[in-house]
Each structure stands twice: as C-alpha cells, then as structure tokens.
Image (cartoon, rainbow, N blue to C red):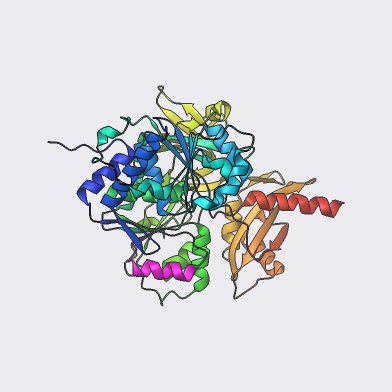
C-alpha cells in the first residue's frame, strides 16, 4: 500500500512516532522525551481540551516559555482541532488583553507565576472560557479558580481506554493551524494566519535545502513565540530529528557546553548570537566536531561576521537566509556560494518564486532596486481581522488561489539572480535627495576593529530630510573612537552615506526575538532631539 505524506502538522508527529517510537524527540534541562511519549502526552492534553469545550477552529493562546509544556500544548491544541497562538513569555497585560480579544481566544495555557498578569489582562474583558495552568495551584487567585484546570491533574490519570484518532476532530489541510502575532511598523500587532498546508509547505522546503536527516540534533535557543524558533520543532518532528530546547542564549558558555555534550548538528542563530560567539575569539575549548550547519535569519549577518565565523568554524556549513513571518522563508544562499556572494541571501527556496517590482508593479531587471514579491504555498493567508493590511500585502495573482505577498522589503538582484537585501520600506533613509540602505553602512561599520554590532537609522533633519545616525556596540577588548569610526566610513562609503552622528553604546536594545530594536533607537533619538531643542 502506498504511504502518503501527512496533510496536517500533527500528522507528521504521529507518523514519526510510529517510525521511531523510542527515539529521543525532545531534551530540556537534562530530561528526555521519546517520540512515543510526546505523541501520547499531547493526545492526553488534546482530550482534556476537548472536554473543556475546545472545538474545531477554536483559538488557544499559549503563554509559556521555551519549555516542554509549550511543545505539548502546540500539538495538543492541533490534535483537538484548534489553532494555537504562542505568545512571548515577557508579554505585558495590555498586549495580552489585546491578543486574547482580537483573536477571540477560547482558552489560555499559562504558568501559575503569570497569574497576576493574566488577572490584569482579563479585567474588563470577556476573557477565555477556560484557563489551563502549569505550576502551583496556590498561586492562582480565587477569582480565576472556577474556570481553571491544572497541568498536573490532566496527566495524573491515564484515559480509561486507549486513545484513538477517532477521538479527535477530522481536519483538512486548509484549516487554520497557527496565528503568529508580529509587531507592525505602526499600531497594534498583526496576527498572521497560517493553515496546515502553509506550515507544512514552508517546513518541507527548508528541510529540503538544508538536507536534514533523522540523525540531526538541533539546539533551539530562539523563542517559540518567534516563527524561527517554533519551526525548529515543527521541522524536527517532520524529519525525525532531536530538539535540544534551551530557555535562553544569554549565558553562552553553558549553551556551548551542551551543544558539545549532546553532539548538536544544527544551530539556528540570529546576528546577536554570532556577535557573542565572535567575542569569544577562541572556540578551541569546545568540541564542535558534530556541528554540521548554522542557519541565520531574522536580520542579515554583516559580511565581516560571516568571514570571521568561517575562520572559526571552517567545517560548518553556514546558511544565510531571508524570511518574513508572512511566508516563513523566502530565500537561502547555498554554503558553496558564500565566498563568492557573501552579501547575498541567495535565491528563492524550493517551491517558492520571487519577483522585484517597481512602484507601478512592473518587474525589474537585474541591477535595479524594487519591492520583493513572494509567490508559493509558503505564503500565509493574511492578517486576522485586518482587511486593509491584508489587501495591501496579500494580492491575487493569475487565479483566486494564487496569492502573492508584497513584502515591504527592498531588494536588488544581480545578473545571476542572486538576491541582496537593501532595507525595509520604513527603514530606508532619504538623505540629501539620496535613498540610503542602512544595511550597507552597517556592513562597513562592522569591519572596523573593535566594533561588535552596529545599527543605522534616519533621524529628522530640516535641511537633509533625514540625517544618518549610527549606533555602535564595541567589543569588550577594544573601544574605537567616534573619530576613527567616521574616518573609516569616509574612506569606505560614498559621501552621502557617511553618518552625521555616531553614538557608542554598551549594548544595543533587543526585541524579544533577539533582533536589534531600531524602533526603540528611533524613539530615543526623537526624545534626545526634543530635550536638546528645549
């Protein structure tokens, strides 16, 4: 009998559990769970959710950190026919209230220590009909007890009869699987809607170009509320790998020690992690012989950081990638092209197509800068309850189901069709009549000895339109002067690209996903300017 691939995200977990029941699927804090255990525990949770009233298409918010409970919750919600929404564990009450109300969430899964935040978030709102808590019951206020159940109780007694697939709703691949709330350039966060088909298509393409096999072990230090971190689990459970789930990359030595101990083969990073690695200078104390590849997305790696990383880990394949939450991944640069095209994010990944268009919708030839448009099964459905942004970003192609994502990102391609990120529309700087790419300036700043990271923004200027301001974080061992930085820029950049102002910071602010928070830098600049003028 022919075996077809599963059409649902949780169907892949079931299949892998059938193939490798005793293989370790998940490691956290030295505890291990096999595929059979992950499958069974998420079954039990799904049954509980159904008993508590979760129905097909219902939304459930998961307000937990990088923990096994988050993984079980994701698959439990899917098996119950629901749509999961993993949110940052650092989220405050006002934003949580907005997401609960905006998504129409039916349930909330959260640790007991978040009870005060959740209680505040639920004040004045309808709130979800039920709460499922991990942690101690005594931490839950009396006002929330009546609609609450507790994690330990769910798993304390086994079902009276074996669990069967018939105990769960029948779903199809166009059913929604996930909502990921992402901060927009303005206003409230937008909920990106993904079907099972979208998620499986994106994950399958990434697995294909990385070449993942069941013997791969991946360390996941990225927040599971961040699609880059979430998909490490989704993909590993599809190809049968092992996930080492870590809570944070703040303490680098313990993390690197565990990478060696568990013979990790895949290490997904963001530029912040690379900057921390490079600050160590000598990695000889760590045995990285098992490490096969490093992937980067979220923000582009400076060219100099790529070169240093290559020298430090010459046997490791480095994948520069580009993606958006709205389509998960767009392009990747095969490692064999890294020396030839170090500034590129490569070409479109398998089963994905890209175009560069001008502001009139015309496709541009090589050498021109235009907006990146993405076509493929990885393109999500749109934004939850946001018709105008959806119509602006997700436009129809040649037939109704041919949806195209207008990314809001400027790119350039060369004569060989390799893509180069220029900047987001709202990040581009217009100074002295010229359109300036912050990325190009940041690459030059990171070449300066003693510079660990750099961020460039435009600040309002009455004469130039926008003045270029650079924020620089120095390495611990050196601190370049502002004069040296400006002299280096003057030698290596066109005159209109040289920053008018340089600010040296101990560290650059971060978003919860580890990216440099340019919005916060821009707000700081506005406040600083107002204070100066006053």
Residue 96 vs residue 213: left or right? right
Residue 284 vs residue 489: left or right? left
In the displayed structure, 235 sits above or below 363; it is: below
| Residue 249 appears in view | yes
- Residue drawn where x is 33% and y is 59% of the image: 32
| Residue 313 appears in view | no
Q: Is residue 259 in the magenta section?
A: yes
Q: Which residues are magenta?
A: 252-267
Residue 52 vs residue 383: left or right? left
* Total tally of numbered discs in the picture: 0
Which quadrant of the figure has residue 353? top left
- Residue drawn where x is 73% and y is 57% of the image: 500
Q: Is residue 228 in the magenta section?
A: no
- Residue drawn where x is 75% and y is 49% of the image: 526
In this view, the residue in front, 378 or 258, is 258
Tell me the quadrant of the picture where the N terminus can be found: top left
Residue 478: x and y, percent? 62, 74
Which quadrant of the figure has residue 182? top right
Which residue sits furthest bottom?
285
Which residue sits furthest right?
534
In this view, the residue in front, 397 or 70, is 70
In this view, the residue in front, 122 or 533, is 122
Q: Main secondary structure of the magenta part?
A: helix
In the displayed structure, 86 sits above or below 341; it is: above
- Residue drawn where x is 44% and y is 26% of the image: 397
Residue 20: x and y, percent? 22, 52
In this view, the residue in front, 507 or 12, is 12
Residue 294: x and y, percent? 40, 59
């Amino acid at each position: 009998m022919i075996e077809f691939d599963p059409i649902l995200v949780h169907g892949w977990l079931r299949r892998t559990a059938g193939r490798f029941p005793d293989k370790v699927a998940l490691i956290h804090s030295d505890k291990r769970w096999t595929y059979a255990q992950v499958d069974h525990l998420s079954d039990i949770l799904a049954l509980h959710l159904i008993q508590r009233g979760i129905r097909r298409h219902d939304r459930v918010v998961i307000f937990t950190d990088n923990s096994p409970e988050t993984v079980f919750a994701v698959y439990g919600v899917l098996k119950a026919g629901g749509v999961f929404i993993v949110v940052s564990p650092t989220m405050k009450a006002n934003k949580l209230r907005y997401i609960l109300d905006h998504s129409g969430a039916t349930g909330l899964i959260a640790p007991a220590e978040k009870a005060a935040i959740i209680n505040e978030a639920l004040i004045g709102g309808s709130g979800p009909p039920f709460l499922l808590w991990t942690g101690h019951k005594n931490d839950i206020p009396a006002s929330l007890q009546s609609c609450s159940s507790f994690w330990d109780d769910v798993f304390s007694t086994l079902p009276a009869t074996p669990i069967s697939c018939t105990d769960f709703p029948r779903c199809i691949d166009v059913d929604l699987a996930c909502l990921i709330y992402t901060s927009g350039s303005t206003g409230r966060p937008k909920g990106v809607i993904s079907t099972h088909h979208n998620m499986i298509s994106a994950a399958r393409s990434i697995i294909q170009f990385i070449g993942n096999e069941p013997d791969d072990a991946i360390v996941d230090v990225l927040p599971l509320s961040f699609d880059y971190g979430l998909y490490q689990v989704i993909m590993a459970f599809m190809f049968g790998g092992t996930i080492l789930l870590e809570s944070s990359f703040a303490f680098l030595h313990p993390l690197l020690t565990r990478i060696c101990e568990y013979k990790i083969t895949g290490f997904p990073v963001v530029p912040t992690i690379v900057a921390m690695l490079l600050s160590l200078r000598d990695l000889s104390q760590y045995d990285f012989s098992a490490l096969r590849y490093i992937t980067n997305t979220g923000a582009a790696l400076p060219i100099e950081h790529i070169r240093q990383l290559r020298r430090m880990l010459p046997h490791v394949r480095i994948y520069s990638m580009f993606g958006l939450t709205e389509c998960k991944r767009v392009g990747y640069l095969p490692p064999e092209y890294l020396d030839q095209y170090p500034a590129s994010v490569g070409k479109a990944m398998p089963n994905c197509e890209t175009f560069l268009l001008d502001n009139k919708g015309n496709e541009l030839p090589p050498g021109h800068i235009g907006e990146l448009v993405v076509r493929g099964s990885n393109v999500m459905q749109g934004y939850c309850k946001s018709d105008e942004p959806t119509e602006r970003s997700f436009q129809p192609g040649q037939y109704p189901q041919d949806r195209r994502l207008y990314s809001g990102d400027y790119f350039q391609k060369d004569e060989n069709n390799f893509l180069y990120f220029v900047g987001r529309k709202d990040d581009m700087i217009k100074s002295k009549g010229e359109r300036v790419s912050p990325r190009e300036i940041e690459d030059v700043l990171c070449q300066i000895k003693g510079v660990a990271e750099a961020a460039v923004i435009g600040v309002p200027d009455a004469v130039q339109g926008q003045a270029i301001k650079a924020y620089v974080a120095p390495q611990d061992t050196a601190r370049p002067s502002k004069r040296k930085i400006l002299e280096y820029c003057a030698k290596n950049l066109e005159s209109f690209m040289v920053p008018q102002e340089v600010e040296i910071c101990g560290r650059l602010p971060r978003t919860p996903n580890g990216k440099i928070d340019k919005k916060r830098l821009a707000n700081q600049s506005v406040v600083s300017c107002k204070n100066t003028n006053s």
